[in-house]
Amino acid sequence: MKILIKDVLLENKTRDIFLNNGRIEVISDRCTLAADKIIDGSGKAAFPSFINGHTHAAMTLMRGYGDDMPLKEWLEEKIWPLEAKLTEEDVYWGSKLACLEMIKNGITVFNDMYWHWEGTARAVMDMGIRGFISAVFIDMFDRKRAERQREENIRLFEISKKYRPYVHFTLGPHAIYTVSEESLRWAGEFSEKNDILIHMHLSETKEETDFSINRYRMTPTRFLNEIGLLSERFIGCHGCMLNEGDCDIMRKTKAKLVHVPVSNLKLSVGRAFPIVHVAGIPFCFGTDGCASNNHLDIIETMKFASLLAKFFTKIPTFMPARVTFEKATEEAARIFRLGEWKIEEGLSPDIILIDLNRAEMVPNFDIYSDIVYASNGSIVDTVISMGRVVMEKRYVPGEEEIIEKARLIAHDLVRR
């Protein structure tokens, strides 16, 4: 599909942008090439789309269910009993709602770990965005369960090919306290053999660190390095309890991180992402699931991340707005192997148009400052994913059915 965006602000200049099947072919003052779709970009600014580095998409069905509870009680009394009742169809509609919400917030790529893998994969393909999707790998140190989990992941890896280019299969060992050493070693070998990413919770809580030290006599990061799991394919999420030595290991192994500030604050994990120690480690941002964050807005997440960095370092210039923005776009794209995520000729980023006539975007002295500090996802007007317009004038085709269906399923799930 050929798309022409007319009179849009790009790096402080009004330009036309011509895309052919998602690839930017022309950026000029005035483009006269014929297009299948013309978008009026006046009063809007063009940017590469946002990337959500850590989600449990179908947990949109649990938004607001059991809030303001201690973590252990919340999991054992609310979340786990509900998840035990989920079907693939539930996950499909919960994930469609998540995709809808992310599109509305300018997110076209997300990294997910959840149950009923194909439910999420189908939703991603139907919504026309990209998902790096892992099945939850948990064996609870049980050998038979571990064998079943490995077989299931091999099966999902094979069938994932039918969902390309929308879905990228990843491995999702949940955490060191739910996955045996043998299974973690297998995940590392499978990842290396097939060159696929590993998506894992890492050093999220003190309890996790205590478990690792008691069982393995070392921190989670050092343990994962000892068994060969850390590499440029490893993406560790949260990282709140990482120490300086852990970060040195992450740098040496070229592993990556995802900063999840809103969820970590809400669940009171007790410590913030160690921003001072992570220099040299590529990291992006994640929202987590809607049960622990309540919504899927990377712009809000960027603000929390930047403000926390300034607060804890006592340096007001730390993580300025543009650097923060680039971590949610360009650096995230490098972490997920998506190529150069910039609006330049010859490149193929997904593109969002931001409404400059929103009150929070005025007077617009610095657009990156306005986005990171003043706004939220509602400033996004139009979204182009993989060369296709998936939202225009804040409307996503079929959104009414998704909202109604997800609402019914969520309430039915609680009653089952």
Image (spheres, grey):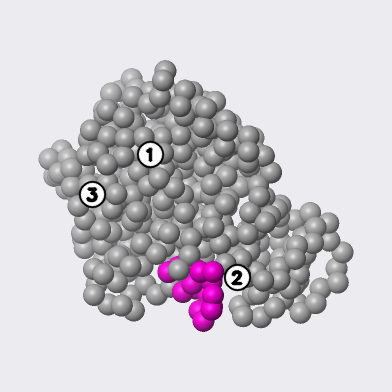
Q: Residues within 10 Å of mark 2 (few under 14, many from 20)?
A: many
Mark 1 or 3, closer to the camera? 1
Above or below 381: residue 374: below
Q: Provide the secondary structure element on which disc 2 rests.
A: loop
> Mark 3 or mark 2: which comes first in sequence?
3
Labels 1 and 2: the sequence-earlier one: 1
Name the residue tied to disc 1. Answer: 64
What amino acid does circle 1 point to?
A: Gly
150 relative to 342 in the view: left or right = left
Which residue is nearer to you in this view: 176 or 325? 325
Work out whether residue 213 or residue 311 is closer to the camera in this orientation and state it.
311
Residue furthest to the top in view is 416
Q: Percent position (x, y) of residue 66?
A: 32, 35
The alpha-carbon separation of the residues under discs 1 and 2 comes to 32 Å
Q: What is the x, y in percent for residue 404?
A: 57, 33
- What SS does tag 1 mark? loop
What is the span of residues highlighted in magenta in the rendered image?
Answer: 359-373
Residue 356's tag is 2
Residue at 26% x, 29% y: name it: 76
Q: Residues within 10 Å of mark 3 (few under 14, many from 20)?
A: some
| Residue located 44% across and 47% down the image | 295
Q: Quadrant of residue 271?
A: bottom left
Q: Residue at x 24, y 72 (%)?
A: 313
Q: Residue at x 29, y 49 (%)?
A: 266
Q: Main secondary structure of the magenta part?
A: helix
For badge 3, the amino acid type reads Val
In whole angstroms, how far apart are the C-alphas of marks 1 and 3?
A: 19 Å
- Of pointers 1 and 3, the one earlier in the residue sequence: 1
Residue on which the image places disc 3: 269
